[in-house]
Amino acid sequence: MRILLSKKIIYAAILISSILSLYIFISFGILTERILKVKFQFTDKVLIGLSVTNTLVSLVSLFLPITVSILYIVLLFCSIFLYFERENLKLLIFDLNRKSIVFIITFPFLLSALIFSLNPPFAYDSGLYHIQSIKWIQEYTVVPGLANLHGRFGFNSNIFTIFALTSLKEIFKQEIFSVNFVIYSILVLHSINRMYKAFKQERFTNFFLLNSIVLFLVLEQFISLSSPTPDLISIILPLYILTNLPKNENHSGLKLENYFASIILSVYTISVKLATVPICILVLLFIIRCKFDGKKLLILISAMFLILLPWLVRNVILSGYLIYPFPTIDLFNFDWKVPLDSVISEKLSITGWARNPGEGYKEAAQMKFWEWFPIWWNKISKLNRLFILISFLSPIFVLIYGLFKKVKVDFQTFVILLTSWAGVIFWILLAPDIRFGKAFLSVSAISPLFYFDFRINFFPIKISKTSKQIILVFIFIVISVFLINRRTYNRCKRFIQENSAFFVRPKKIEIPQNLEFTKIQMNDLEIFLPAKSDRCYDHELPCMPYKNHNLILRGKPLQSGFKYIQN
């Protein structure tokens, strides 16, 4: 009986972690509403809760390792807070209960996502540095000069501290990565809900088509669900922000507080991945344009500062730079500071690999635009070429059309056009790997849907409400079959076959059977080194992919950090 019970508990690992994550995010979302004195709709509430929770956990990580004890304290705080906010919570649950048809439609998507989340992490970078970064957060407070051990540790994606908080490692004896599944589920639910609202109008509109494409783009991130990668958040958050700006009959009548959610999420997204930095354009335009009073602006700027502060402090401690790997912002001179040539090399490797992945990446990083562009263009697929061309030309087409037809482009649409198009340009010049610019490319490509309004009747004849709902469910089933590509389907099928007796905890990352780790002595430092590989996977700390005899500890324990031997 005890063995059977333990199996059931293990099977529920990803579900338990997901429920706890959602519980925490909703709690801090409601708390933020109270502090800012604004109301957020459900999806905003969860995403704002994510950003606030992430900020607090990153702050705690400066002083303490993020263990399960920190999770217990957070859960206790949330429970006490929600006890006093139980009426607010009841209203939230009541509102969700009214959307039963949306939950029914969404259920197959979420079930398949849950099953896929049980797979081992597939992302290459998860074995390279994601999991190792999370292990350092769980076992130590932020370590000075950790980027000297492995340059990628300096990237410091903010989301890693949330993965560490909700991993339940001490309970299940391995990390459970549920955050991507939670955010993916919320965005799928949100997109289907918006499509359902449009469907009830019995018309095929630009709004319906827009949200159908957004749903497709969210579902496309299915492959990231089992990995602790920041890619999913850095793609679907800008996508959500740019396609869900608050609406009003008169856009000029919107006040700054109406954009609080969009602005806070934009700032937070930058801390997850620097490739999303063009979203700052949206923030600046809204602050400049909207009507506001000094108090509201001060509150907003304070919130933005507080979100970025722990992340920036972690940057400085990990690498010695405020923004890594951008050596031009060079403000500090700590002994753990990553050497300048290493920072430049890290930056060039990102740029070069995006331009010409493979042996020629170093040369590509040094090339002029007209030199590397033909090489890069010839290597990408024809479909991606078409996608990029549409993304580049669509905003220009809208602006030219509006100019010639003398149909004014409203402020919100202009913000979307400018931000997404600037994001595309930034992406091409900095690191033109599709995954780095997917959100901006996608929004830019579909930007005409924000400008052109059209309405086509779904049903030329009158049919009952029940029939409409059956048709809608059928449509979503058909769509889901096409959206889940063969590669993803085969992985799900293989996983189910291998675990048909019962589902165990999510599989750990798969380490090649012939990969061995050796323990070597470098100066006063004992370190694990993978043989014939650049990835440490989830091996015990400290682990690095290559020897570096210029590296030493700053003190005796690992917590003291790492530095280079001074010449």
Image (cartoon, rainbow, N blue to C red):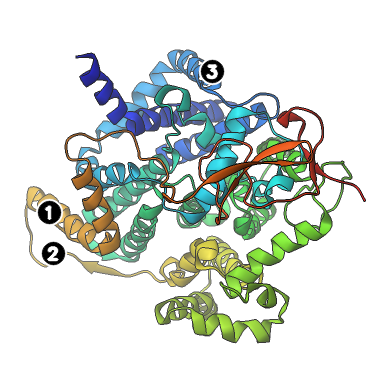
Instruction: Assign a secondary structure to mark 1.
Output: helix
Foreground residue among 453 and 492: 492
Which of the numbered marks, if any, corresponds to residue 468? 1
Is the C-beta separation of discs 2 and 1 under 8 Å?
yes
User: Residue 59: x, y in percent?
Assistant: 67, 30
Is the C-beta separation of discs 3 and 2 under 8 Å?
no
Please determine whether, in this image, residue 373 is positioned above or below residue 445: below
Quarter placement of the N terminus:
top left
Please determine whether, in this image, residue 95 is positioned above or below residue 552: above
Instruction: Assign a secondary structure to mark 3.
Output: helix
Q: Nearer the viewer, mark 3 or mark 2?
A: 3
Question: Amino acid type of disc 3?
Answer: Ser
**Which badge, 3 or 2, is on the more N-terminal residue?**
3
Question: Amino acid type of disc 2?
Answer: Phe
Q: Which residue is mark 2?
A: 459
Please determine whether, in this image, residue 133 is positioned above or below residue 34: below
Foreground residue among 5 and 545: 545
User: Residue 402: x, y in percent?
Assistant: 51, 78
Question: Does 198 sit left or right of 375 as displayed?
Answer: left
Question: Amino acid type of disc 1?
Answer: Lys
Foreground residue among 116 and 566: 566
Q: CA distance from mark 1 to mark 3?
A: 50 Å
Which of the numbered marks, if any, corresponds to residue 69? 3
